[in-house]
Every structure is written in structure tokens, then in C-alpha cells.
Amino acid sequence: MFSITIDLIQLFQLIVLIFLSSILIKILKLFRKRWKLMAAMKPFPGPPAHWLYGHALEFSQDGTDLDKTVTWAKKYPYGHQVWFGPFTAYLAVYHPDYAKALLAISEPKDDVVYRFMLPWIGDGLLINSGQKWHRHRRLLTPGFHYDILKSYVQEIAESTKIMLDKWELLSTSGKSVELYHHISLMTLDSILKCAFSFHSNCQLESNNSYIQAVYELGFLASERFRTFQHHYDLIYYLTPNGIRFRRACNLAHEHTDKVIRQRKEALKDEKELERIKEKKHRDFLDILLVSRDENGIGLSDEDLRAEVDTFMFEGHDTTASGISWLLYCLAQHPEHQQKCREEIHELLEGQEKFEWEFLSNMPYTTMCLKESLRLYPPLPGVSRKLSKPLIFPDGKQVPQGCLVALSIYSLHRHPLFWDDPEKFNPLRFSPENSEHRHHHSYIPFSVGPRNCIGQHFAMNEMKVAAALILNRFALEVDEANPPIKTPQIVLRSKNGIRLKIKKLEK
Ligand code: HEM
């Protein structure tokens, strides 16, 4: 009996010892990581950091702090270290030369921000890397061929018209209207129709649960990034936000599965299959379902879902942001709004349909769109985890394993590359003024091997929507409710985009 008690005590002591040693090893590992990070970041001094929180407290919880990075970019024009807590640091870069070096390589995306989106959009084109990314990029590129994009213009115009009919009713009140929500529904409707031939009627059905899930997911993923203790899965998924995130993910996935299921069902029909084989009305989902690599292997079900989710996210939230901020800029600048309208009236007068050719005949509106994408880039930043050391043109280097985040928002307002950067001036994009710009000072769609695969689709959609909106409505700012910028992965406004919309006389 006595010896059993001794054994138990010894066993207990052993367990405690193992437990304490493993904690000690963990702590030592963390401090080793910190020491390595500090050495890596030494060439890039930055704003003073709190010993525990680092710079985390500099970022407000609601994310209304984009302009802080612009202030930092003025002080540290190339870039600087940023700490989130004592053990996570990244290099924030703002300079076009640094952007060029970073974007020239197809490094993996960082494993912090993008990891938070992984449960939602899966390992699709936006997130995956290496061989898988090469293969998927090759398989998906035909989905953005000119012939395919051409067939989408009518669908986008249709979706925009549904939205504008709703605006007609709303405009009679004389009060300002929150437009972001409507635009977001419209771009979702468009991407569902264009890419997936899925007619969801989401613009007319109120309280669309998918849209709400997508809002939640964008908001929660960026909130998670800001709250550094939420970076740990174990903690996060026990918090109310973690639970909300899981629930929203399930909802979004159910929606995606439904879209894929319906198409697979439809493809069982001989005529449908014939249509794809003959390349008649091929949409993006057709291409995903029938694509094969050089070994004749197609996408697995898991990959298929990830790509569909990636395109749902990338394909509607980004363009909703682009259109909304364009409208806000034009409302702020009635003189530019009027010039666009004159151009559009001339183009659309007496026309029943929105023709593909119109897209290349609206130069002033295009300049305004480019300028609003400069001031309000829908994806305000991108980041990478380096798989090998990165050497910048000035000779400074960051070692393998480091996180590097490029702020597109601050790059687009960099005082060394833009005169009067805060001013909305579409003429910056006139052909003569565009010539002398640094190639990497304007990159709303990123550049290099991992640039935006959907950029032509996006530009077309934003132009169609802008033209049809300006053709029917005049826009005025609501002085009492200016937008409050907030990067929820996509650049949104905390209080929406509220504008007064007035129907134009015929
Ligand atoms: C105004 C609208 C848009 C903007 C500003 C935009 C911007 C960007 C940016 C900056 C990237 C690089 C992301 C990174 O490096 O992490 C990107 C990648 C991507 N975009 Fe877009 N995007 C827009 C619309 C779209 C649309 C409409 C689609 C699809 C229909 C799309 C699909 C993608 C995909 C799949 C990637 C990942 C490409 C890769 O890594 O190979 N985007 N986009």
C-alpha cells in the first residue's frame, strides 16, 4: 500500500515535470522566434511598439485606421516593421520599388490573414501556392477569355437594371439611400448569373441569408486579424465571434454546394453537355467542371468548391466596393459626374441594349473609375510569406519565413509618387499623364504572376454599372453621413455609402 502511494506521488511529480518542461520549451521557442524576428526586422525600423501588444493597439478595433498607414508611409517611405503581440511581426511596405520586388515572385500568400479565410474560401486560387496554384491558374484562365467575357455584358446590364428599378422607388422619399447593400446584391446576382448561370433572384428576395453570411465572414476575418489573441484557433473558436464564423461558413458552403449540385444535375442532360462541347454559352462553372490538365485529370470536388467559393467572394465583394466608392467620388465631384454623364448619354441614346463595344468608348468614365480605384482600392493590401529571402533594389533583404504586407492603399497615396495624393483628379489617367508614372505606383489589381485573374471581368462590370446608373440618376453626397472607411478584407464603409439619388428627366 505504502509503495503504491510512493509510486503515485512519483508519477504525479513526473507528469508535473513533463508538463512544466514542455511549457518551458514552448516559451523558449517563442522567445527564439522573437529574437530571430527582431534580427530580421532590424534593417526596417518603425514606429515605437508596446512591449506586449506591439502595434496592435494602434489599429482600432473597428478598423477605421487606414489613414494611419498613410501617415507611417510618409515617415517610412519604403516600409517598416509592425508587431502584433510579442511573437508576430511583419514588414509593411509602401514603395513601388519594394512592391515590384515583392510581386515579381509567386510566393505563397501569408499564413495569417489568408489562413483566417481558409475555412471559408478553401484552398482555391487566391490562397493556394506552388504546383497546385500553377495547375489551377492554367485550368481557370480560359474562363476569362474575351469571347466569354463578351457574353456577360448583357447579364450585368440586366442585373443593374433590376437594381435601378428598386432605386426609382427609393429615390422618391428625397432622403439619402445606403447604396452599398444594393450594389453588393447586384454584383452577387451578376457573378451568379455570369459565372455559374445561377438565377438566384437575390436582389428581390429580402434578407438573403447567403449575403448576410458573406458580410459576416468578411467582417469576422478582418476582426480576427486585428485581435491578436484570436490568432490562435483554440481560443478563437471558443469565442462568440468564432462561433458566428463557423455558422456563417456552413451557410455559405451550403449555398455553394447547391449551385454545384444543380449544375452537375443539369450536365446529366445530353443537350447541356453538347452545349459545352460546342463551346456555346460556356460559363465559368462549365469550364471548372470539364477542365482537364495535360494528364487528363480534372478538379476534385473539394477543389471545385474552393474555386467556386473563391470566385463568389472575389467576384462580387470587390466590384461592389469599386462601384460604391466610384459613385461616392462622383457625388463629391458633380463636375466630373456631369462629364461622365454627357459621354454616356451620347453612347446610350436610342440604344436598346448595352453593347460590348460601348466599354471601349467611355474614356472619361474610365479615367474616373481608375482614379476612384486609386483612392479606394477594393483590396487595400496583399501579403506574402517568403519561401526564400527577398532582396529589395536598395540591397536590404528579408529572410525566408518572414511576412511581408504591401499596403496598396498607402502606395496609391504615396506623396513621392502622386501630386496632391488625396485629391480626386481623373486626369492623372489621361494617356499623356499616364506615361511617366512609376509602373508599380498604381496596382489596384496587383501585378506579376499572382495578379487578379478577374480584372477584365471586374472593369467591364464596373463600367456597365456606372454607365447605367449615371444614365438614370444624379448623385449627391449626404453631408450628414460621410462614409467611414474600414478594411474588412475588402474596403467598405462602416456606415455604408449613403447618397441622395435623383431620377433624371428623360
Ligand atoms: C474591382 C474588383 C477587383 C479588384 C480590385 C481585385 C483585386 C485583386 C488583387 C489585388 C489580387 C491579388 C491578391 C493577392 O495577391 O493576395 C486579386 C487576386 C485575385 N482575384 Fe481579384 N479583384 C477584383 C475582382 C475580381 C473578380 C471579379 C474576380 C473573379 C471573377 C477576381 C478573382 C481573383 C482571383 C481568383 C485572384 C487570385 C489570383 C491568383 O492568385 O492567381 N477578382 N484580385
Image: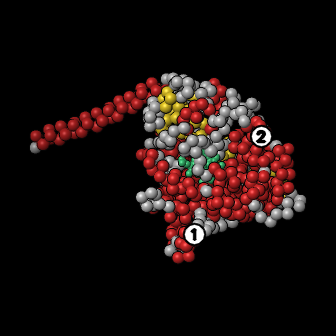
Question: Which residue occupies the extreme right position in the image?
Answer: 505
Residue at the image position 71 percent from the left and 33 percent from the top: 436
Mark 1 belongs to which amino acid? Glu
Name the element at disc 1. loop
Vertical side of 74 occupied by 9: above or below: below
Image position of 69 (left or right of 433): left
- Quadrant where the N terminus sits is top left
In the rendered image, residue 322, in percent from the top left (x then y), is placed at 69, 48
Image position of 479 (left or right of 445): right
Residue at the image position 58 percent from the left and 34 percent from the top: 99
Let me know if residue 300 appears in the view.
Answer: no
The image shows a total of numbered marks equal to 2
Residue at the image position 68 percent from the left and 51 percent from the top: 459
Label 1: which residue? Answer: 278
Question: Which residue occupies the extreme bottom position in the image?
Answer: 270
Label 2: which residue? Answer: 430
Separation of disc 1 and disc 2 at Cα? 41 Å
Name the element at disc 2. loop
Q: Residues within 10 Å of mark 1 (few under 14, many from 20)?
A: few
Vertical side of 292 occupied by 341: above or below: above
Vertical side of 81 occupied by 287: above or below: below
Q: Quadrant of residue 279?
A: bottom right
Let me know if residue 103 appears in the view.
Answer: yes
Mark 2 belongs to which amino acid? Ser
Q: Viewer-proximal residue, 149 or 213?
A: 149
Image position of 148 (left or right of 115): right
